[in-house]
Amino acid sequence: MHQEQHVGYEIKALANLLRRKVLETTTGTPEGDEFTEMQAKILGFLCHNRDQEVCQKDIEEAFYIRRSTASRLLKRLEAEGFIVRQSVSRDARLKQVSTTPKADALFQEINKRISHVEETLTRGLSQQEVEQFLVTVEKLKQNLM
C-alpha cells in the first residue's frame, strides 16, 4: 500500500521521534519531572548571558511571559538553589539574576545530552546535507510566517 508523502506530516513525525529521543536521554536527571521545560529554558538563557546583567524584566521580555509567571519561576529556581538574586547598585528595586554552580553543572550535563542527540540525529549525513536541510527548513518557516 503506497501512501502519498506530505512535507507537514513528515515534519510532525520527525518532531515526535526527536521529542521521544530527547525524553529518553533526559530520564534520570536529578530533578526528574519537577524540573520543567521553562525552568530549563530560563537557566539556559541565564547561562548563555552570564557575562551580562540580567534582571527579571529581561526574562519576561525574552520569553514573552507575565511578571507573575517570571516571578513564580524565579522563586522556584532560587528555592531549589539554581539561581541567586542580588540588588543592582544603580537601582535598589532591580535584582540581578545569576546562576549558581549547581545550575552551571546541570547546564553542562544538558549540553552533553543535546550533543549526543544531535550526533544520533545527523548520523550518516554529510555536512553539506545538514546545511541544505537547514536552508530548506528556514525556507519552510518563512513560507508559514
Image (cartoon, rainbow, N blue to C red):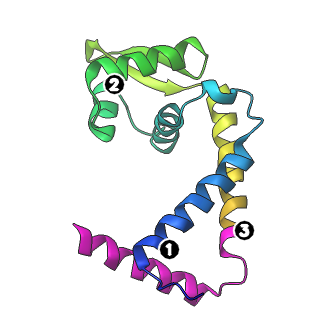
Of callouts 1 and 3, which one flags the residue occurring earlier in the amino acid sequence? 1
| The magenta segment | 121-145
Image quadrant occupied by the N terminus: bottom right
Foreground tag (2 vs 3)? 3
Please say if 41 is above or below 140.
Answer: above
Kindly state the secondary structure of the residue where label 3 is placed.
helix
Badge number at residue 10: 1
Position of residue 53 measured from the top left corner of the image (x, y, whole percent): 37, 32
Which is the main secondary structure of the residues drawn in magenta?
A: helix
Question: Which residue does the image show at 54% across and 66% down from the upper left?
Answer: 13
Badge 3 amino acid:
Thr
Residue at which label 3 appears: 120
Please say if 69 is above or below 62.
Answer: above
Q: CA distance from mark 2 to mark 3?
A: 36 Å
Position of residue 59 measured from the top left corner of the image (x, y, whole percent): 34, 32
Residue at which label 2 appears: 56
Badge 1 amino acid:
Glu
Question: Which residue does the image show at 59% across and 54% down from the upper left?
Answer: 19
Relative horizontal placement of residue 115, taking residue 143 as reference (left or right):
right
Position of residue 40 measured from the top left corner of the image (x, y, whole percent): 54, 36
Badge 2 amino acid:
Gln
**Is 48 within the magenta?**
no
Where, by quadrant of the figure, is residue 36 drawn? top right
Q: CA distance from mark 1 to mark 3?
A: 18 Å
